[in-house]
Amino acid sequence: MAEILVLADHEGETVKKVTLELVTLARRFGEAAVVWTGQGGEAAKDKLAEYGAAKVYIAQGSEYDDYVVAPKAELLAWLVGQRNPALVLLPSTAEGKEVGGRLAVKTGSGILTDVVGLSDDLTAEQLIFGGAINVSSKVRTGSPIIAIRPNAIVPEPAAGAAVVEPVDITISDQARQARVLERVVQQRGARPELTEASIVVSGGRGVGSADNMALIEKLADSLGAAVGASRAVTDAGWYPHQFQVGQTGKTVSPQLYVAVGISGAIQHRAGMQTSKTIMVVNKDPEAPIFELADFGVVGDLFKVVPQLVEEIGKRTS
Amino acid sequence: MNIVVCVKQVPDTWSDRTLRASDNTLDRAAADAEINELDTYAIEEGLRLAEAHGGEVTFVSMGPERALESIRKALSMGGDKAVHLVDDALHGSDALGTSAVLAAVIGQIGFDLVILGSESTDARTGVLPAMLAERLGVPQLSYASKVEIDGTTITINRQADYGYDRVEATLPAVVSVVEKINEPRYPSFKGIMASKKKPVQTMSVADTGIDQAQVGLDGAACEVVTFAKRPARQAGTVVADEGAGGTKAADFLVSRKFI
């Protein structure tokens, strides 16, 4: 059976959910062979086995973390040359897409990004223009490189051998040009990552201030959700830029999206309208965000949200 | 310092964007056109760096005749000259083909720094900066929220989910920017007048030296098979808060098994 290469997204030895989603998808097309860069691969292999990984290539050199993207692309290109995979799967994250882009140039293969589904003949489903149009696309040259949007596939356990195969290749000087000097972590609390979270609670202009974003955080924490923000909020400096949901920020498609004090400009909708369920709290009944709402409350968020948090507390305790 | 800024004309996000039924490519006629928003931040950063360190700013844009509007807009913000890559053979190019011709043009112009927006609002692939860095063989400094240059050393803050990485490289380099990086200037009246006199060189695929078989719809490594408008979401329930709005919202979450 042909190998399907899956680039693992992980934080140390913690496997990110999207990696399990990719392994689940890969099994449909061949042997899921996970490509693990940096440390933690040995410790993670049991988890990967639980989701059906047949193989784990571990390239544990520090260069994969010390330099931006290029070493990972070089590693994948080498594996593609050696193993001739039927498909290369990557997470459609900022970095995953960049690795894929460089790999595409190296191998001459086509790349499709932000893919939400893959049919048996490798036709990829994408949602474009902020989710307004469904597109079916195919790669017609080389081993297809497909970047899958996090949260698009449901991870399903299945037994796999997860046989470890160390890979030790020399990364070229060319791939060591952009050196990471320092990683600055600005995470807020222990919340799930925005693009991976099953539930996202976002605040908009109606929240009114940086301090009031604490209310959004409180609601998010009561649901085990990630916090997002509209562009108005990040532009005003009320919340860090990396939490922005929308056309110039992150695209999310969680099971539940809660929009609080967000009017729903096209900018914002482009980043969230493929969410499975959408709940809205806004004082303006004319706000376009209500067009997307499965459930909406027209009211003052400073009254509705604290009551909601209290009710969630009562019902989950 | 030679700074090249890539500029893309895209359909206005606010207009009704669609594809053409005839060849499944972007329907440019159906929508108003504008400069890709993130590119305005790239332009601003290029102009600021040139002001601070000296040098020339050249805009490069690939697109049909109409893309000249976006090139003029960029030139009205500042900069010295532009190259317009315009050729019917380019119609339908994918990111691989686009990056090949852009890299060829940028190589011909000569550069210390290439700056572009981290993605375009139409295709949103976000792969072009990485592809350009790969093709040009220079460091990839993407998703920059801050750029500092000291001699030939360039340092950026690379925006990430967890915060950012400080990344260092030696020029020449490719930089892509996020909108946090600066506040783009508005063109002044003087700038608009001056832009009309700035040279815009037109180039075809043949001028780039790239094989025509590598570009366009036929040269693309990917193809759109079909497309369809997504059905509108079904209208949901909207209630007015009369004191129990939060409770009703909680009821909804229970009914959908979120709590």
Image: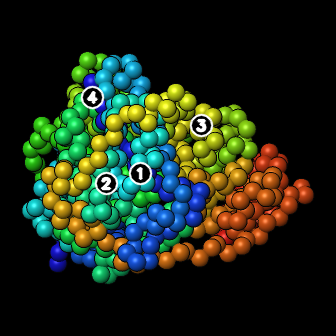
Amino acid type, callout 3:
Asp
Residue drawn at 50 percent across, 34 percent down: B192
Expressed as whole percent of the image width and height from the top left, the position of residue B171 reads 23, 28
In the rendered structure, the answer to whether residue A216 lies left or right of residue A154 reads: right
In the rendered structure, the answer to whether residue B161 lies left or right of residue B170 reads: right
Amino acid type, callout 2:
Val
Q: Nearer the viewer, mark 2 or mark 4?
A: 2
Residue A235 image label: 3
Dot 2: what SS? loop
Q: Nearer the viewer, mark 1 or mark 4?
A: 1
Marked residue chain, label 4: B
Residue tagged 4 = B2
> Pointer 1 and pointer 4: residues touching (CB < 8 Å)?
no
Q: Nearer the viewer, mark 4 or mark 3?
A: 4
Q: Are marks 2 and 3 on the same chain?
A: no
Q: Is residue B204 above or below residue B152?
A: below
Q: Are marks 2 and 4 on the same chain?
A: yes
Q: Earlier in the sequence, mark 1 or mark 4?
A: 4
Q: Is residue A269 above or below residue A204?
A: below
Answer with the quarter of the image where residue B25 lies. Answer: bottom left
Residue tagged 1 = B67
Residue drawn at 18 percent across, 55 percent down: B206
> Badge 3 local density, few (<14 within 10 Å), some, or many (20+)?
some
> Observer-nearest residue: B248 or A180?
A180
